Image (cartoon, coloured by chain):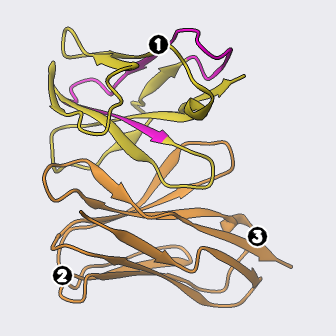
């Protein structure tokens, strides 16, 4: 069964360091989402791509976060520099298109020390 | 701003009992999703409700949607321990297509 792949699964870093997360969506899915989930809360959207274009990045802290999906397939989310408050689960999801069901990857658990 | 509110946020119930989780949302939407999340794990899709009056059932879980009341319910019948998890409802954002999630209902089923 096709799945969304994410790596790494766990990342521990120190404050002010740079981190990067990778996501490979289900083949053929044009829409890709990055969500952040703080412990005890629901996921919140960081950025949404349609193919290689950003559809919504209104909640992305652009001073330290960046995201790209250069060829419209896999995607990278970067944080530089990391802050203590960035400790969270970062979830990638994909869908055939907007308004289609989203499928979530296993997530990357980030801990910033 | 789209708001999604779930209640209760915490629920402890005995095996064999029935209970309902409620999800209210603040804007018009015809699409509502229920997800399950086990501790430290990702989100597993349970139900996709696409129209007013939609009802879906899987095992001991049944979800329904009333778009006029902006309300969805997740009903648990004869709970078993394996249902212990956090359940999220989510609605499409009003200005786009990403999901707005509730805070989740943490369910614990005890013997």
Against B64, residue A53 (above or below) is: above
Marks 3 and 1, how far apart in space? 42 Å
Q: Quadrant of residue A28?
A: top left
| Secondary structure under the numbered disc 2 in the rendered image | loop
Does the residue at mark 1 contact the one at mark 2 (Cβ under 8 Å)?
A: no
Residue under the point 40% across and 47% down: A44
| A42 vs A97, nearest the viewer | A42
Badge 1, how many Cα within 10 Å: few under 14, some, many 20+?
Answer: some
Are the residues under marks 1 and 2 on the same chain? no
Residue under the point 23% across and 58% down: B92
Residue A10: in magenta span: yes
Instruction: Name the tint of chain A in the rendering.
Output: yellow
Q: Which chain is orange?
A: B
Residue under the point 53% across and 64% down: B104
Residue of label 3: B81
Are the residues under marks 3 and 1 on the same chain? no
Q: Quadrant of the N terminus of chain B?
A: bottom left
Residue of label 2: B52
Residue depth check, mark 3 versus mark 1: number of the one nearer the observer:
1
Residue B29 in the image: state x and y as whole percent.
Answer: 17, 70
Asked if residue B65 lies left or right of residue A40, the reply is left
Q: Quadrant of residue B53?
A: bottom left
Q: Chain of mark 1?
A: A
Residue A5 in the image: state x and y as whole percent.
Answer: 46, 23
Marks 2 and 3, how far apart in space? 31 Å
| Secondary structure under the numbered disc 3 in the rendered image | helix
Residue of label 1: A80
Q: Residue furthest right?
A: B111
| A50 vs A97, nearest the viewer | A50
Q: Which residues are magenta?
A: A8-36
Asked if residue B66 lies left or right of residue A81, the reply is left
């Amino acid at each position: 069964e096709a799945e969304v792949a994410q790596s790494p699964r766990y990342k521990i870093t120190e404050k002010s360091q740079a981190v990067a997360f990778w996501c490979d969506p289900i083949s053929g899915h044009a829409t890709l989402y990055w969500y952040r989930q703080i412990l005890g809360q629901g996921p919140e959207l960081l950025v949404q791509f349609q193919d290689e274009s950003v559809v919504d990045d209104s909640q992305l802290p652009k001073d330290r976060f960046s995201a790209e999906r250069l060829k419209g397939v896999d995607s990278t989310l970067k944080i530089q520099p990391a802050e203590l408050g960035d400790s969270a689960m970062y979830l990638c999801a994909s869908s055939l298109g907007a308004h289609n069901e989203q499928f979530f990857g296993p997530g990357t658990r980030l801990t910033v020390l | 701003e789209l708001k999604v509110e779930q209640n209760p946020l915490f629920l402890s119930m005995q095996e064999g009992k029935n209970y309902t989780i409620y999800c209210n949302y603040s804007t018009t939407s015809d699409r509502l999703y229920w997800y399950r999340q086990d501790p430290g794990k990702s989100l597993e899709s349970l139900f996709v409700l696409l129209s007013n009056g939609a009802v879906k059932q899987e095992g001991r879980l049944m979800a329904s949607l009333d778009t006029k009341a902006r309300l969805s319910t997740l009903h648990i019948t004869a709970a078993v321990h394996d249902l212990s998890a956090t359940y999220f409802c989510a609605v499409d954002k009003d200005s786009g297509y990403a999901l707005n999630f509730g805070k989740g209902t943490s369910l614990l089923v005890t013997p």
